[in-house]
Amino acid sequence: MTSQTAVRVGPQEPSDADAIAAVLAGDPSNFAVLVRRHNQTMFRACRAVLRNDQDAEDAVQTAWINAYRALASFRADAAFRTWVTRIAVNEASSRLRAHRRFAEVPLEEATMEHTADPEQAASTQELGRLLERELDALPEGMRVVMVLRDVLELDTAETAACLGIEAENVRVRLHRARHLVARRLAESASEPAGAATAEVWRFEGDRCARVLAHVMARITAGPDGREPR
């Protein structure tokens, strides 16, 4: 399945593979291409785990530095987007454990308390905010799976690889998460939720620029990405 949310590469932009090759050849400025292209994906993955915008932004910055330091280990047998998303999920999960807020919720116990029309666009944005609220109400295991599958549109195998779980576990969590969210949205909205997924946890403007500036300052400071003392 072709991802509708995958970032399109313009005719003047290097592909992920070309940008990676340039970085590994000694030109770290090309890493900015990767950061700009996949920043929103990284943020959404971290936000799904941490449920806090600022914590997610901090995790994204660290995840990008981790990705830069491990770039030579990247193998093209997987998409760079999948590889870097796994790094983001790992960083966010590590922070959650450090905050002593990480807990696996058994699935059987889980409970939940494209248009130019301005009016329809406003309605879609509002539904997006409702969807964000319902995603935040999901148990972590379901929330992260639903974001990776339905917001980032990774396939089942990619999602399983990012989370280190079995594909069948992904399918079960996704089914239950969709059911819970659909039920809650049906109580508060009449519009289908599909169009609203693009509105979930957008990562643009100043925030995106801030992360890019931070990451590039770190990786250009030295060969290992550490700031000068």
Image (cartoon, rainbow, N blue to C red):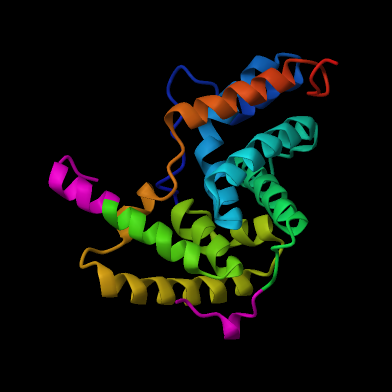
Above/below status of 101 relative to 72: below
At x 79%, y 31%, the residue is: 69
Q: Which residues are magenta?
A: 105-125
Seen at 64% across and 15% down, the residue is: 29
**Above or below — where is 70 with respect to 98?**
above
Determine if residue 80 is in view: no
Residue 122 lies in the magenta-colored region? yes
Q: Position of residue 143 (x, y in %)?
A: 53, 64
Image quadrant holding the N terminus, namely bottom left
Please state which of residues 216 and 27 is positioned toward the viewer in this rendering: 216
Q: Nearer the viewer, residue 71 or 94?
A: 94
Q: Where residue 18 sits in the image (x, y, percent)?
A: 62, 23
198 relative to 24 in the view: left or right: left
Residue under the point 51% across and 69% down? 138
Residue 108: image location, x then y, percent = 59, 85
Q: Position of residue 92 (x, y in %)?
A: 67, 50
Q: Is residue 32 visible?
A: yes
Q: Pick out the residue farthest to the bottom.
A: 108
Q: Is residue 127 above or below residue 172?
A: above
Q: How many marks?
A: 0
In the rendered structure, does residue 52 fall within the stretch colored magenta? Answer: no
Quarter holding the C terminus?
top right
Quadrant of the image occupied by residue 217: top right
> Residue 8 occupies which quadrant of the picture?
top left
Q: Up-down: is 190 above or below 120?
A: below
Residue shown at the point (44%, 47%) measured from the top left: 201
